Amino acid sequence: MNILLYDFLNSYIQYDLVYYLTKAGHKCNNVSYDKEVDKYEDPVFTAQMEKDLSEGTYDLVLTTNFWPVVSKVCNKHDIKYVSWFFDSPPNLVSTECMDYPCNKIFFFARGDYEHYKDLGLDNVYYLPLAVNVDRLSAIQTDYCKYESEISFVGKLYESMLPSFMAHMDEYQKGYIEALVKVQMQIYGEYLVDDVITEEFTESVRQRFKSLNENAIQVSQKELAWMVASYITHLERMTLLSILSKRHQVKLYTYELTDDEKRLLPNVDFCGSVTYLEEMPQVFRASKINLCPVLKANKTGIPLRALDIMGCGGFLLSAYQPELYEYFVDGQECVMYSSIEDAIAKAEYYLQHDDLRKEIAAAGVARIRESFRYEDRINLLLST
């Protein structure tokens, strides 16, 4: 097949996707588009895509995540458009363009797939992510640089919720505080979307409007995201704070705020790492790799979790329904169901080197067996 791919903002899985498509004999034109794109209406990108299509003959267009602006052009030209989400939840404000007949939309998280299927879309599919174990195993690890007892690679997630709540009435503040407290204690069930109702959101909008006629009018989806990202932030900060008082903890992220630095004085802040070359070395050289999952990702196995195991690293992850479905807890990875559980399991596995290494070895074996790019690509192209 001749395939036109668009890489928006350096998609993490783009390199491996192109590698395996090419390896399978497909001809790929991979266009790196580093300008900011409006997902729904972008005349500059649309003109570029029209030009790209006019200069070649393609059997399909492929992107990571679904881009309505791409779908519109594909629908116009009657060309198949395949998209594979590696983000959850999808950053889409509506289902506009999703029902076009040209689309084949794959979600790595079953919860997202079921959501859109329930909305009546019959061109959506479930497909977990994959790992290029061959690439990962070929990377030489600098243990002197990256060795650590515990590491975490990822964002801490800033949230506007605290400043937003400052303008709510006492009932609204208490309502959200109670939700945060309960959701912090529950793993495997996502309550936020059900509790942050449209009715409650409307009451917040009315409260803000009473304070200022021109005040921001938040949507239900936006408010739910504020809550989810805030809970995620609290979990990650709490884990790092407690663990770093007892063990060496390295944090790899883009930047920390002054408040975060103050609250995490014992954490070794190492800056960011590159996805293709440096991150695998962190995973392999760390005794324990933390994977607290974004709360808004209701079911899916995050790419970070798969990459950790694909590197032969030891994964300590928040309980996630699909992770529990595909991997044997305590044998191929380890999951926690509370902050206290995470702390206890980190302590235990740091003291049991042989068991930790056995679990890591079993994890990479499961990845090799069940999360191959070759299998995923066959499904992407044949569906």
Image (tube, grey):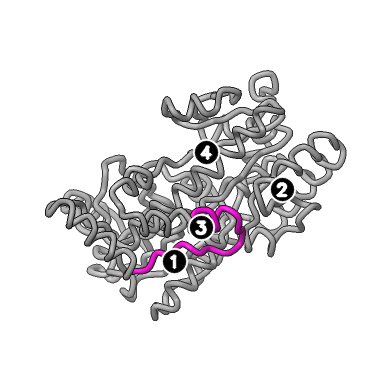
Q: Earlier in the sequence, mark 1 or mark 3?
A: 1
Q: Earlier in the sequence, mark 4 or mark 2?
A: 4
Residue type at mark 2 is Asp
- Asked which secondary structure carries label 3, the reply is loop
- Asked which secondary structure carries label 2, the reply is helix
Cα distance between the residues tagged 4 and 2: 21 Å
Cα distance between the residues tagged 2 and 3: 20 Å
Q: Position of residue 302 (x, y in %)?
A: 56, 52
Which residue in the protein does label 2 denote?
A: 341
Please say if the residues under marks 2 and 3 sit with CB atoms less than 8 Å apart. no
Cα distance between the residues tagged 3 and 4: 15 Å
The residue at the far left in this view is 213
Q: Position of residue 336 (x, y in %)?
A: 69, 51
Residue type at mark 3 is Asn
Give the foreground label among 4 and 1: 1
Q: Which range of residues does the magenta coloring cover?
A: 180-198
- Asked which secondary structure carries label 4, the reply is loop
- Asked which secondary structure carries label 1, the reply is helix
Q: Earlier in the sequence, mark 1 or mark 2?
A: 1
The residue lying at 42 percent from left, 69 percent from top is 104
Residue type at mark 1 is Val
Give the foreground label among 2 and 3: 2
Which residue in the protein does label 3 denote?
A: 297
The residue lying at 66 percent from left, 45 percent from top is 133
Cα distance between the residues tagged 4 and 1: 27 Å
Which residue in the protein does label 1 denote?
A: 195
Which residue in the protein does label 4 denote?
A: 154
185 or 44, which is in the foreground?
185
Q: Is residue 338 magenta?
A: no
Q: Which mark is residue 106?
A: none
Packing grade of label 2 (10 A; few <14, some 14-19, many >=20) is: few
